[in-house]
Image: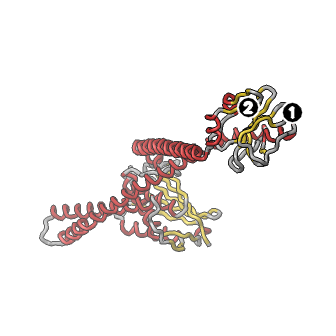
Amino acid sequence: MKRKNRVSGVSAFVYVTFAMAVIFFLTMLLEIGFLILVNYRYSLYHQRYIDGESIRDALTFADGEYRLSEDMQRQLKEAEQWVMLLDGEGDVVWSYEKPEEIGESYRLSDIARMSKWYLKDYPVHIYVWDDRMMVMGRPKNSIWKYNVEFPMRWMRFMANAGVWMLALNFLWILLLSVFFTRKWFKSREEVRLEWIGGISHDIRTPLALVMGYADALGSSENLSDGERRQMAVIRRQSAVMKELVEDLNLTSALEYSMQALRVEKLRPAAVLREIAADFLDDAKEGEFEVTVEILREAEDAWIKADRRLLIRAFRNLFHNSLRHSGQDEKTVICLRMWSEKRWCRIRFSDNGAGYPPEVLEQLAVGKKNRAARHIRGLGIVQKVVLAHGGKIRFENGREGGCVCEMRFRAVR
């Protein structure tokens, strides 16, 4: 059982790791694809810009005037770009395609403003060499141009935010991996439950026929004593097979919360006395002894439970004590019930050999166990109690024997 649980844990770890790797790869692929798309769209919107140095190299001064090469003129027209050259006094000494609304002289304050913003809503760039300044302008509403400044505290915050963003991305990938892993395991368990249900259904029909024919043949007067003993074995083993199928279905249903509880308000004191009386009536004389001790305050205690499942759980405890008592003496079973605050507590104990350590480990509270075959009944007891919102503890008594203590929430 431990090995199976370890294998399941390793499978889950491998699947989560694989899912994380796949999701990380897909996330990175999506982000890279988004960046490629953004860059592609930018390339469509991006306007070609001819820098001041290129224009300066194509500009010559001769015979008291500036001349711009024809090739550069063509490039400026294609780029819808105009140019003007200011001298050290701020006067325009040369221009190309300059709009009429642009003035011919500028003060230092005008130059300071246009170096950062706009010139009459025209986005401009400044190129300075020697004592001259070249202003390159573009059409209105073609460029978004603003100076941006941030406090250093904000920049440090943004740096930390980037780290947090990476951590959140990792957490998001991990959550997605766990989500898909849970879905994967859930689908596997659904297939497992369908398979169990199908096998159980296929077994019930031939088993019912075997038990029916065995009963009919067992009552025949033509059988010898040896044949009657063999027929009794067939009936007994058929009953064991039927119980195994029922336990398998009930265990699977309880483990995955598929068992619909038919809850009713009942007195556990009456249920305990009923179960003890039924077992004493069915047992062979001197096979075992049952004592029922119900404290006065617990006589009128009520709980909400599925009566059928509750009886099934106590019957499994009785059967476990009889089958695994580990002694030849008469088995003594003690049922004790008392109330404590808002809980109704029931203690089942016997004088047997006690639970083996490996059984107690598998039945430890809080572990989702798949009980081994020889403690299948105890596993059902545990699942029934937990399905009712109760608590259960298995242990060995100080003087030997098995002890099972259950707590159910009391109701008025």
| Picture coordinates of residue 335, whole percent (x, y) | 50, 62
SS assignment at label 2: strand
Report which quarter residue 391 is drawn in. bottom right
Residue occupying the point 15% across, 63% down? 227
Q: Which mark is residue 66?
A: 2
Look at the image and tell me whether residue 357 can be seen: no
Question: Type of residue at label 2?
Answer: Tyr
Where residue 14 appears, as percent x and y from the top left, is 44, 41
- Tell me: residue 146, above or below residue 321: above
Would you say residue 118 is visible in this rendering? yes
For residue 153, side relative to residue 20 (left or right): right
Residue ID at (15%, 61%): 226
Q: Nearer the viewer, mark 2 or mark 1?
A: 2
Q: Where does label 1 land, which residue?
A: 89
Of 211 and 230, which appears nearest the observer? 211
What's the residue type where badge 1 is placed? Answer: Glu
* Quarter the N terminus occupies: top left
Residue at image position (54%, 46%) is 37
Q: Residue 312: x, y in percent?
A: 42, 65
